[in-house]
Amino acid sequence: MAYKGMDFYLADELFTKEEILIRDSVRQFVTDEILPIIQKHNREGTFPAHLVPGMGELGLLGASLKGYGCAGVSATAYGLMMVELERGDSGIRSFVSVQGALCMYPIHRFGSEEQKRQYLPKMARGETIGSFGLTEADFGSDPGGLRTRAEKTAGGYLLNGSKYWITNGSIADVSIIWAKLDGVIRGFLVDKEAKGFSAQDIEGKLSLRASVTSELLLEDVEVPETALLAGTEGLKSALSCLNQARYGVAWGAIGAAQAVFDEAVRYAKGRVQFGRPIAGFQLQQAKMAEMLTEITKAQLLCARLGRLKEAGKASPAMVSLAKRNNVSMALDAARTARDILGAVGIMDEYQTFRHMCNLESVKTYEGTHDIHTLILGQAITGLDAFE
Ligand code: TGC
Ligand code: FAD
């Protein structure tokens, strides 16, 4: 039976026909291409790179950007795409988020015309893969302290430092490296072939296993003048990219929550204990009612956020609220669904445990749950509680 997303408050009525069509094409892609292979990739800890050209054909890469071969869809359609992708797997959505929101967006926003023409069309087709190197081993929530340095040379810049926890790191053709030049954070496009640049995958992850996460090392890496994203100036340039990615994460988390809800309800209806389906017991119904309520609230939150973004009215704090709420909601839903599944809930034959493990990373990256709490605290009080 074709997958039909849970839509208790008829949120589909808030979307245009075109947005629904886009959503449905991604839904089909996830059903046909991702769900049949994700268990294997999650088990083996491998990224299904063969899917990338198909993602390009579907317009998933840099989908909301205008021109340069990008699909130019609405912010809402982009969000709906993320919901579907994350119904498949948070790691696959991560690939698309990093490619589009964290690599293509900064090139589109801060790059020269030449840089845009050189990178964006190939990135939209998935022929060039990108990564975003902001975090360092000693600077996660506090990226302003980063130690990677750029020095001006006669022909360009010399980069030294390292980055940690970088999605797509070892498969990227180009990495955006955030480094301090004369004490100011700037973005640099670093080619994977650059001498002195290397990427090594981080082993032993129990979460986002179908996504590549790497350490990047830069030892006297010489890049030309043209590697600088000249429009970048300070931490706020990097943080503005995070707004785009956090927006997609807020939507995507709904997809993971829908997947585990769907699985839990189906299982509960079929699983008989004490002579009747466990779905008929009040305790299980209370869990399902809670999941339904929270998913519905998250859907409505994002539907509104999408329209605010299209109108240029979505503030970073609004995005933080949605990322914080929806990821936490999805993680709670996954833990509840796992409980409803009983013992089989720990098996990877079911998708719930994989989603649950993935969501632990999603809660941490793109600003931890706590950091978004502090961003909201600052928005409410005007007082900064970070330091
Ligand atoms: P602070 O002094 O508050 O701000 C520095 C400047 O930036 C401005 N700003 C923003 N601008 C645009 N968007 C935002 N969201 C912004 N937040 C702040 C701010 O107005 C200021 O501007 P100006 O003109 O005064 O210079 O900076 P701080 O050092 O106190 O740090 C603030 C804090 C903690 C909120 C920030 O650093 C933060 O968000 N930390 C979390 C780090 C984070 O989210 N890292 C994510 C790395 S990428 C990733 O995880 C990818 S996961 C893969 C995937 O997506 O799938
Ligand atoms: P820390 O900052 O050390 O935080 C540890 C704990 O302390 C958290 O609970 C946090 O909330 C809390 N804490 C920190 N500061 C405060 C405070 N002021 N007040 C109260 N509590 C606080 N980064 C990139 O640049 N690019 C990527 O592509 C990327 N991909 C990632 C992929 C994965 C799978 C993961 C797990 C991470 C990725 N990251 C990436 C890094 C991610 O953004 C960081 O992990 C995140 O910002 C948190 O940093 P940290 O892990 O160093 O935790």
Image (cartoon, grey):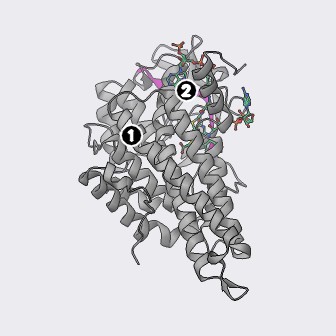
**How many numbered markers are drawn?**
2
Please state the horizontal and vertical placement of residue 90, each as a whole percent of the image.
55, 54
Q: Quadrant of the C terminus?
A: top right
- Left or right? Give the position of 313 relative to 358: left
What number is the disc on residue 306? Answer: 1
Asked whether 102 or 130 is in front, the reply is: 102
Residue at far front of view: 282
Q: What secondary structure do most residues of the magenta stretch adopt?
A: strand
Ligand 2 image-quadrant field:
top right
Q: Is residue 173 visible?
A: no
Question: Amino acid type of disc 2?
Answer: Trp
Instruction: Report the span colored magenta.
Output: 214-225
- Element type at mark 2: strand
Q: In percent of the image, x 49 and y 60: which residue is there?
A: 87
Q: What residue is disc 2 on?
A: 178
Horizontal relation, residue 384 to residue 305: left or right: right
Image quadrant occupied by the N terminus: bottom left
On whether ligand 2 comes within 8 Å of the CB at mark 2, the answer is: yes
